[in-house]
Image (spheres, rainbow, N blue to C red):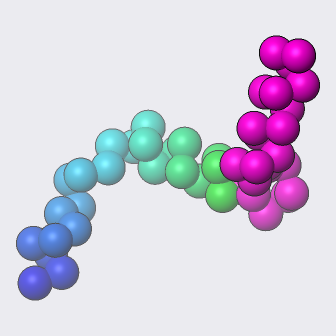
Amino acid sequence: MEAELFPDDEDSPEDIAKIQAARADYKAGDCLTFDEYRAQRAERSA
């Protein structure tokens, strides 16, 4: 059943690399919450 829901060929190597890079950034604390992002956007447009 799981194989039907999550086929292995769904993610390309490029997608997997992006996901791994995003996880590394998150673990390093190099990320924003959506609220922080919105606050920065509001400051830029003001």
Which residue is painted at 18% across and 81% down in the image? 2
Relative to 45, say whether 25 is above or below.
below
Looking at the picture, how far across and down is residue 40, in whole percent? 85, 32
Which residue is painted at 75% across and 38% down in the image? 38
Looking at the picture, how far across and down is residue 10, in whole percent? 24, 52
Q: Is residue 6 magenta?
A: no
Q: Can residue 25 be seen in the rendering of this structure?
A: no
Looking at the picture, how far across and down is residue 32, in whole percent? 79, 48
Q: Which residues are magenta?
A: 24-46
Q: Is residue 31 magenta?
A: yes
Relative to 9, say whether 4 is above or below.
below
Which residue is painted at 70% across and 48% down in the image? 34
Q: Residue furthest front?
A: 46
Horizontally, residue 7 falls left or right of residue 19, namely left
Q: How many marks?
A: 0
Q: Residue furthest top?
A: 45
Q: Tell me the quarter of the image containing the C terminus.
A: top right
Which residue is painted at 79% across and 63% down in the image? 27
Q: Can residue 43 be seen in the rendering of this structure?
A: yes
Horizontally, residue 6 falls left or right of residue 44, namely left
Q: Nearer the viewer, residue 8 or 37?
A: 37
Prevailing SS of the magenta stretch: helix
Looking at the picture, how far across and down is residue 8, in whole percent? 23, 61
Q: Residue furthest bottom?
A: 1
Q: Tell me the quarter of the image containing the N terminus.
A: bottom left
Q: Nearer the viewer, residue 22 or 36?
A: 36
